[in-house]
Image (spheres, rainbow, N blue to C red):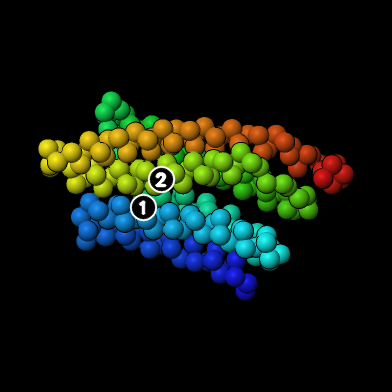
Amino acid sequence: MNLPNKITLTRIFMIPVFVAVFYCGLLDGWCYLASAGVFLLAALTDALDGHIARSRNLVTDLGKFLDPIADKVLVSTAFIVLLTVPACFTVQPFGSYGSIIAGIFVALILARELIVSGFRMIAAGKKVVLAADKLGKIKTVFQDVAIAFLLAALSFLVKGAGAVEQGLYAVGEIVAYIGLACFALCTLLTVVSGVHYIVRNKQVLADGSAAGEKS
């Protein structure tokens, strides 16, 4: 197994570590800030393994299989655990509606990833090579940024809930607003990039030989 694939596997192994830190409770509210650090470190390995694989010509079928799985599982896990502690979604003026909207956004993101993954399976079965979508890469960046800000916001909101005078809660609200803006944008980009990806490669859904001719 080459170095890029080992880095990708490291990202996968960091997912349960991220969840454990998120729920550890040993650091009180700061466990969320610590989990943000773990998440960012895991997310950065995505750029690292890709750079090494391309620069050293170490791209393998195993890497092509593991890399997107690692990314999707990491992001999906982060959004799901965030929904279990919705304080960052319910800041004013959203209130309880914020968690409902967040749930809808996460459902859209997960649906998109499942649909595109199924689409790629069909393409692979027809031996059609699909080029990477730039919009997809941009949405991944905004997803990572949104998650990092929302995780950090949780720490300040939880720590400041009983000590508003210290200004921690106010800081948490500001960080949450930034995270929510990125969350809304990444959800939009997720849906748009998914539609664009399928429309651009619609030949995959054509019958047998027709798809092969257009690939």
Q: Is residue 67 visible?
A: yes
Q: Position of residue 190 (x, y in %)?
A: 54, 37
Q: Which of the numbered marks, if any, corresponds to residue 146?
A: none
Q: Position of residue 171 (x, y in %)?
A: 25, 38
CB under 8 Å between discs 1 and 2: yes
Left/right of residue 41 with respect to residue 210 in the rendered view: left
Residue sticking out furthest to the bottom: 1
Q: Position of residue 140 (x, y in %)?
A: 53, 45
Q: Is residue 211 above or below residue 33?
A: above
Q: State the residue position of label 1.
A: 36
Tell me the kind of residue under disc 1.
Ala
Q: Is residue 84 visible?
A: no
Q: Earlier in the sequence, mark 1 or mark 2?
A: 1
Describe the element under mark 1 as helix, strand or loop: helix
> Which residue sits at x=68%, y=60%?
54
Left/right of residue 51 with respect to residue 81 in the rendered view: right
Tell me the kind of residue under disc 2.
Ile
Q: Nearer the viewer, residue 18 or 206?
A: 18
Q: State the residue position of label 2.
A: 147
